[in-house]
Image (cartoon, grey):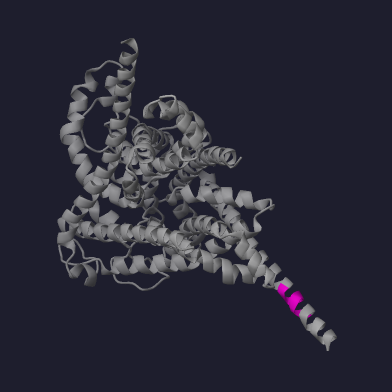
Amino acid sequence: MTSTLTVTLRRRLDRQRVQDAAFRGTTRLFALGVLVLMGGVVAALAAGAIPAFAKFGWSFLTSDAWNPVTEKFGALPAIYGTLVTSFIAMLIGIPLALGIAVFLTELCPLPLRRPIGTLIELLAAVPSIIYGIWGLFVLAPVLQNTVQPFLVDTLGEVPMIGALFAGPPLGLGILTAGLILGVMVLPFIAAVMRDVFSTVPPMLRESAYGVGATTAEVMRHIVLPYTRVGVIGGIMLGLGRALGETMAVTFVIGNAHRIKASLLAPGTTISATLANEFTEAVGDLYTSSLFALGFILFVITFIVLAAAKLMLLRLERRAAK
Amino acid sequence: MRISGLYARRRAVNGVYLALSVAATATGLAVLFLILWTLLRNGIPALGSDLFTETTPPPGSRGGIANAIYGSVVMTLVATLVGTPVGVLTGTYLAEFGAGSRIAPVVRFVNDILLSAPSIIIGLFVYELMVVRMGHFSAWAGSAALAILVVPVVVRTTEDMLRLVPGSLREAAAALGAPQWKVIAAVIYRAALQGMLTGVMLAVARIAGETAPLLFTALNNQFWSADMNGPMANLPVVIFQFALSPYADWQVLAWGGATLITIAVLMLNILARALASWSNRSP
């Protein structure tokens, strides 16, 4: 009697052990799948890019040619556009995000904190294509008619930086793309800043207030130094977004494979080139050159995002201590 | 006198900084409302019944975007159905079996990078993987690209939500003799359900408006098509093409589609947040 019970029990236990192993194995398989996915992306991009890199070699990175007819391709204008628009985006996004994070953590009345925080986060939820048509139909005309003529007349006359604001005000171009990107990455940076600001031990903050520091001084001398790594991580995260952002930029950048000194001139970015030309590319070398652009974009964003992640991890580990 | 002067200056500096931070917040909010206002002003005139019943017209004639709405809904649905289980299982591994494992930190790191990786890169990947092999653009390829975007979002929220479930719940279930898979499937998932649902909704909101990965995969289709094996119309790509076209009626349709998609995405986001805060309140 008891022995049959033990036998059934043991059998059930054995079955459960197998089931547990199967369940654990399945989840592990899918987790490995994520790694395979990343590997696949790298492999597919590299495979597609090989013909272009084989043909042009390193000169692909330094050439500004982009001529589908003669099949001469170079990535420089697209890389330049990607970096410059992202740089402008950071110039706009970082101060705004910092202001918002300070407002939300230090100033905002408690009942308003959640609603305003949510609204700022919704800015990140608006699809990229919506920023694109808004930029094209609303922001670009305003820039063309008022802001850019003003810039040309004032900053355009200043020696040295004048060249940055020269030329006809088209409304579309590097500056417009940078502006839109700045707004788009702002919620991502602000969210990270808000989170890392809240990791500051209350005792540090309160001691500073206790010796008579103002809010601005607490931010500058206590909170920012304490969260520096996390803040930089958040900024890099925003930068990663800005570098790869596609649709919004495609609408407003003007799509010209040229490097002009002026920020008002049309240009292109890697992602905008892909969005505009990929489905229309004829010829293997053309398609392969676009894959090569994609590969370069992936490498740049991977480095930026990985650095961001490592910095945030460092802060997390310190906060856990 | 000297001290009070210094104090006054510090207060003034503080005032300037705080005013700037208020101004920054106001700027962010202003942009959001400007975008919404523009959409409503241009989009509401387009929201007639034709928009939902007619297919995309040739330039110069009347029509709607019914085929694009259908395509977007179908591809989003397929992508969510495929991506969610993958994300949930991966998230489960990271949260429940990841401790002490060597691959878990790597998976977490790679997943976070995929989360922010440019979506157009995913489009290129699926193009190389599926479109080139199949020889043509297809709704399957579009769904696959979107599914790849769903996975990292769901992995992240699933892991975070499972970690919030108290360990005592796991121990109690195990003490009753439940095997580990049963503890997770019947107890932990149930406890974390609302949070995981939030993640899925956020993922749907993210892919509903994605354009870049669809450009090279699902492409577009002017006609009504339910064939998953062929190119299929979808809202984002239709908005892209119609907004950049020189035809006024196409631009009106683009505004209509843009308004629809934005309202849907923002609603999903607000709902997801409401669900998350509600589930946090009643553990």
Q: A149 or A238: nearer the eye? A: A238
Q: A51 or B78: nearer the eye? A: B78
Magenta stretch: includes residue A14: yes
On-image quarter of the N terminus of chain A: bottom right
Please determine whether, in this image, residue B133 is positioned above or below residue B121. below
Task: Kindly give the residue lying farthest to the top in the view shown.
Answer: B2
Horizontal and vertical percent for residue B280? 45, 59
Please determine whether, in this image, residue B98 is positioned above or below residue A3. above
Residue appearing at x 58%, y 59% in the figure: B166
Horizontal and vertical percent for residue A207? 48, 29
Horizontal and vertical percent for residue A154? 20, 21
Q: Toward which corner of the image does residue B62 lie, by quadrant? A: bottom left
Residue A232 visible in image: yes
**Horizontal side of residue B248 vs A85, given as left or right:** left
Q: Which residues are magenta?
A: A11-16
**Horizontal side of residue B177 vs B213, given as left or right:** right
Task: Kindly give the residue lying farthest to the bottom in the view shown.
Answer: A1
Magenta stretch: includes residue B231: no
On-image quarter of the C terminus of chain A: top right
Principal SS element in the magenta part?
Answer: helix
